[in-house]
Image (cartoon, coloured by chain):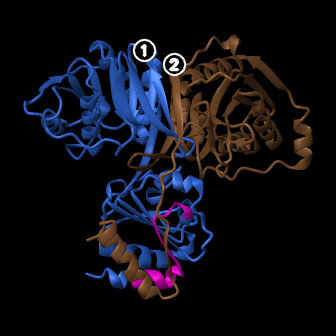
Amino acid sequence: MNILCVIRQVPDGEAKLRINNSKVELDGVTVIMDGMDEYGVEQALRLREAGASVEQIIVLAVGPARNEDAIRTALAMGADRAIHVETDTYLDPIALSKIVTQVAKEENASLVFSGGQQSDWDSQALGAATAERLGWPQVTWTNALELSGETLKGKHDIDEGAETFEVELPAVITTQQGLNDPRYPTLPNIMKAKKKELRKDSLDKYGVTAKLKHVSSNIQVKERMGKLIDGKDPQAAAAQLVELLRNEAKVIA
Amino acid sequence: MILLVAEHNNGKPSKSALELVQAARDLGRDGPITALLLGQGLTSVANEMSKYAEQVLVADLPELAAYNPEVWAAAVTQIAQEGEAHTILVSASRSGREYSARVAVKLDAPLLEDVIKVEAQGNALQGTKYAYLARVTEVYESDAAVTVVSVKPGAYNPAQPASGAGEQYDVELELPQSRTRSTGKVIEKTTRVPLTEADVVITGGRGVGSPENFSKLIEGLADNIGAGVGATRAVVDAGWRPYGEQVGQTGKTVAPKAYIAVGVSGAVQHLSGMGKSKYIVAINKDPEAPIFKNADYGIVGDLHQVLPALIEATRK
């Protein structure tokens, strides 16, 4: 079977963001493969290492030229080859799922991994929308997964807590913390990754346009008061904080 | 019509369902506000919901006893098509964000996801949402004939009952078979106020030191002031506390009146889950901890001394 891992390249969590022309400006910002997607790449590798008959692990990224860095990271982790739909055009998750679906079909994938919520657009829709287009079941927010034959078994988070599940392939799985510990690419593997196939596609091939129009972006920083109390005298500090919470913030009785 | 899918619990509409009613009223778009109830044994929740919505559609079926994304998406899509809904409102719970994406694909409609505000602009809808780990707000617009919107829990105030009683209708649905088998559920139970509904949340980080300290210090203070208890990812990963208490990108998003972070350094992934709290209080011995940059009040000191003093000072 083939596994398709969808990845996004996102700003590093600690990177300082700024707005230019009412959009988040990423030039000069450190960007990395989204951590949530990394769990998917790692899990694909682990399924193969655990003996599943995985022929190819294919990585897909849709976005600007700089996404190549994230793709090379996934290849250096051990994915076999990659497809990069290179575009600067904004696509929302529902529109993007159309590309993922076409690639999954072309590549004869029977398992698609995507992150539970990507840290750039804070969206959880890509996995579910892809599953719907493919007519496949999906399991989101998995934090344990194994494959026996054609059956995936695992555990995932739901509204009320957690649930263990079983689902037959083909399926779409979204990944998160707890599923595994993604490996660091080693230098030899980084070198090897440079020789792996990275196919560049244009957006035209997929006939996809955005369903939503981006209107504006604004940095959200709430001004905080920053009143710091020295805790060397714990009793005095505690009394002062309780006083502030009672009489200034009025949040405790 | 505006169709909203009302989540419910123990025979009552969830708080999020009443928030959706308020979002629908604020939108002021044409047509009646129609609430859809999916589940089994819905009589009491339907009666309650008809105080809020002009129409209540009741799909009371054994196949809907438990949530499933494929089944829920099929149900909502059928009702939206039959009722010619132009706006479909869903709570942005974990399940809501999952099946709403499927509904959008089925209806070939745009999805305004996890919005904190949705407004009509002529025939278009504009939704405001957080992005980049809640460090940015973004506005997106849909000018499609049908738009699916998931609304962040807590973003709207719950609606007050309307004056008249809404009509109730039983609906029939053709539902697909679920292909995912649930083999067991672990339901989170807490005797405390639920994290997402608490006015005050106290969260402990790794700095608390041990599960025993967590019980003694974090729960001790929470008991005194009626607060919900949260934990950082590191604490949950260490197995000290259940996942249901985790606050942050991979856990719950909370925005209480006061958020007290104890021994929490303040990584962006954590801030994205609590940064919208009205007041943020930090207690940490490291004056350089990033959490202090995001705090209204802070104590720079050893939590093992400060917390017992706080527990003493708040003792009833």
User: Is residue B176 visible in this depiction of the protein?
Assistant: no
Q: Which chain is blue?
A: B
Query: In the rendered picture, chain A carries what hue?
Result: brown
User: Is residue A62 visible in this depiction of the protein?
Assistant: yes
Which residue is painted at 22% across and 18% down in the image? Answer: B31
* Residue denoted by label 1: B144
Which residue is painted at 55% across and 25% down in the image? Answer: A92
Query: B28 or B63: nearer the eye?
Result: B28
Q: Amino acid at mark 2?
A: Lys
Q: In what element is the residue under mark 2?
A: loop
> In this rendering, is residue A29 above or below B168?
below
Q: Quadrant of residue A76?
A: top right
Q: Quadrant of residue B81?
A: top left
Q: Chain of mark 1?
A: B
Q: What residue range appears in magenta?
A: B293-309
Residue A51 locus on image (x, y percent): 74, 41
Left of A136 or right of it: where is A5? right
* Residue denoted by label 2: A211
Q: Amino acid at mark 1?
A: Ala
Q: Chain of mark 2?
A: A
Residue B244 locus on image (x, y percent): 44, 56
Number of disc labels: 2
Q: Is residue B308 magenta?
A: yes
Judged from this view, the residue extending furthest toward the left is: B164
Q: Quadrant of the N terminus of chain A?
A: top right
Q: Is residue A236 magenta?
A: no
Which residue is painted at 88% across and 43% down in the image? Answer: A190
Residue A140 locus on image (x, y percent): 52, 39
Query: What is the C-alpha distance between the residues marked 2 and 1?
Result: 8 Å
Query: Are the residues flagged by discs 2 and 1 in contact, CB closer than 8 Å?
Result: yes
